[in-house]
Image (cartoon, rainbow, N blue to C red):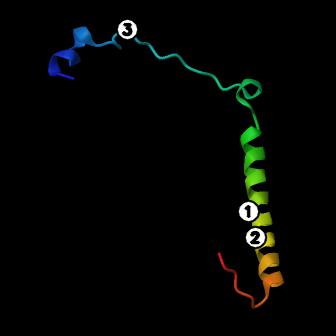
């Protein structure tokens, strides 16, 4: 953009007036983010459990990939 586009008369936002957006839990999802956090924590816990069980089951054998 050139400097002439940034002058106040060419400013596309000169008439813009921001509006205040109110948070409404029924519309915005409420506690949905809390459920997601709980699910991610449970997933991490289960991954650790499965990893430990696989290592225990494998014993001294090596895994080839």
Residue at the disc numbered 1: 44
Count of numbered marks: 3
Secondary structure at numbered mark 3: loop
Residue 26 lies, in percent from the top left, at 77, 26
Residue at the disc numbered 2: 48
State the residue at coordinates (75%, 33%): 30
Secondary structure at numbered mark 1: helix
Q: CA distance from mark 3 to mark 2?
A: 56 Å
Within 10 Å of the Cα at label 2, are there few (<14), some (14-19), or many (20+) other Cα atoms?
Answer: few
Relative horizontal placement of residue 24, taking residue 1 as reference (left or right): right
State the residue at coordinates (75%, 38%): 32
Q: Which residue, as the protein is rendered here, is positioned at the far bottom? A: 60
Quarter of the figure with residue 64: bottom right
Mark 3 or 2, closer to the camera? 2
Residue at the disc numbered 3: 15
In this view, 26 is above or below 33: above
Q: Nearer the viewer, residue 12 or 44?
A: 44
Residue 51 lies, in percent from the top left, at 76, 73
State the residue at coordinates (59%, 21%): 21
Q: Nearer the viewer, residue 63 or 57?
A: 63
Q: CA distance from mark 2 to mark 1?
A: 6 Å
In this view, 65 is above or below 42: below
Q: Which mark is residue 60?
A: none
Secondary structure at numbered mark 2: helix
Q: CA distance from mark 1 to mark 3?
A: 49 Å
Q: Which residue, as the protein is rendered here, is positioned at the far left? A: 3
């Amino acid at each position: 953009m050139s400097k002439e586009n940034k002058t106040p008369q060419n400013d596309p936002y000169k008439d813009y007036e921001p509006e205040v957006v109110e948070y409404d839990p029924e519309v915005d999802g409420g506690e949905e983010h809390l459920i997601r956090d709980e699910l991610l924590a449970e997933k991490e816990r289960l991954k650790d459990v499965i990893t430990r069980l696989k290592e225990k089951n494998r014993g001294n054998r090596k895994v080839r990939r």
